[in-house]
Image (spheres, rainbow, N blue to C red):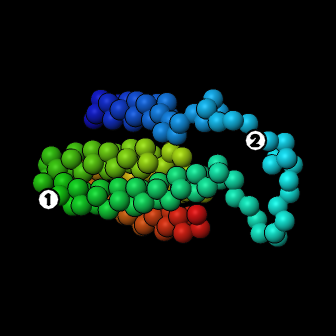
Amino acid sequence: MSRTRLVLTGLAVVAVIAASGCDPQPDSANTAAPPSPAASSAAPTSGAPTTTPSAAANDAATVKACADIKKDIKDNAAKITKAEKIGPPAGHFAVSAQWAAGSVAILAHAMGANEAVTAASEKVQDEMMGLSDAYSKSADAKPSKKALETAIKELDTACSAA
């Protein structure tokens, strides 16, 4: 089992490294003309707060991450239900592997989100890995999912605030 966990962890690390090297946004610094001094020194006349393009892109990335993570959680729940139907003695390995795979998907989609969503998604991922560990230890394991449900509620709160 430690070999399986090592392989899954290795795949997660590779996915994170590969995704961190990807930049879906074009490098506008080399192609855009610098702003004119008059435009950069002009102060906004309205009292409304201004949103920088990077903040707007961050918000869009957070919204996308939240949608992807929620979809991952829903998809993983369906796959867990299917894996649980296998039953003992070997079914617990399938359930354990699915919890681990689901946690990796959460990590992959949390990249680019704001700090609150990232922190909440890490809690969800930690709880999923805890369930994976519990299922890998015993064919008769029925660990509580209360901590995972709490972490998902925290994620929902963080996503609604984004």
Q: Secondary structure at mark 2?
A: loop
Picture quadrant of residue 31: top right
List the residue tagged with mark 1.
Answer: 85
Q: Quadrant of the C terminus?
A: bottom right
Q: Is residue 2 visible?
A: no
State the residue in front, 47 or 120: 47
Query: Residue 117: image x %, image y %?
Result: 55, 57
Specify the amino acid type for callout 2: Pro
Give the residue at x 15% y 46%. 90
Query: Residue 112: image x %, image y %?
Result: 54, 46
Q: In the image, is 56 to the left or to the right of 151?
A: right
Q: Is residue 76 visible?
A: yes
Picture quadrant of residue 19: top left
Q: In the image, is 35 to the left or to the right of 147?
A: right
Specify the amino acid type for callout 1: Lys
Query: Residue 138: image x %, image y %?
Result: 26, 49
